[in-house]
Image: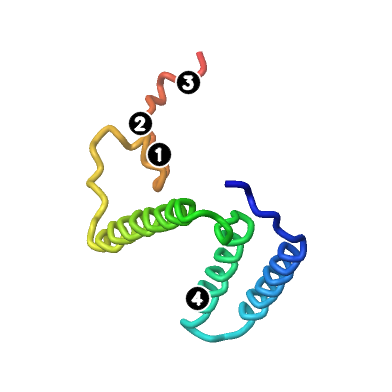
Amino acid sequence: MPEPIIDGKVYLKTWAALVALLLLTVGTAYLHLGRLNFVVAMLIAFAKATLIVLVFMHIKWGSRLLRLAALAGIIWLAILLVQTLTDYATRAGVRPAPSVPGTEAFNLSTPPSSTINAAAHTPR
């Protein structure tokens, strides 16, 4: 199946829409909407991603198989994100393991103890 010839105006309109969405993103960053800031930012990001996928990846003019492949990728990404966020959400009560004697050199949160024999490093 030959690729359709896309008019250059489609790309210019898409670019203009992406620039407008970018300006909208910057503008909403200065608004104090509380918890809605995140929601608005994600909606704008979703709109930008949709434009890019449909136009620049030619999903809009592609075959049903290409659309199915793109949808499968999005579903797989959603599965991985849900599993990652579920794992992260269930780690609230997990405490770090107790330190094992002899591994103080690997603990970067506290300064190293002076376990070096001072007599071995005195000048002769």
Is 112 on the left or on the right of 15, as rendered?
Answer: left
Which residue carries the number 4 mark?
A: 38
Q: Earlier in the sequence, mark 3 or mark 1?
A: 1
- Which amino acid, by three-letter code, is at mark 4? Phe
Q: Measured from the top left, where is residue 63 in percent x and y?
A: 51, 54
- Which amino acid, by three-letter code, is at mark 2? Thr
Q: Earlier in the sequence, mark 3 or mark 2?
A: 2
Is 106 on the left or on the right of 10, as rendered?
Answer: left
Quick check: marks 3 and 4 in contact, CB under 8 Å? no
Residue at x-position 63% and y-position 49%: 3
Label 3: how many residues lie within 10 Å, few (<14), some (14-19) or many (20+)?
few
C-alpha separation, residue under disc 4 versus residue under disc 2: 50 Å
Q: Which mark is residue 20?
A: none
Residue at x-position 35% and y-position 31%: 115
Q: Which mark is residue 122?
A: 3
Badge 2 marks a residue whose secondary structure is: loop
**Which quadrant of the structure image shows residue 77?**
bottom left
Which residue carries the number 2 mark?
A: 115
Q: Measured from the top left, where is residue 92 in percent x and y?
A: 27, 63
Quick check: marks 1 and 2 in contact, CB under 8 Å? yes
> Is residue 9 positioned above or below 72 on the image?
below
Q: Nearer the viewer, residue 12 or 93?
A: 12
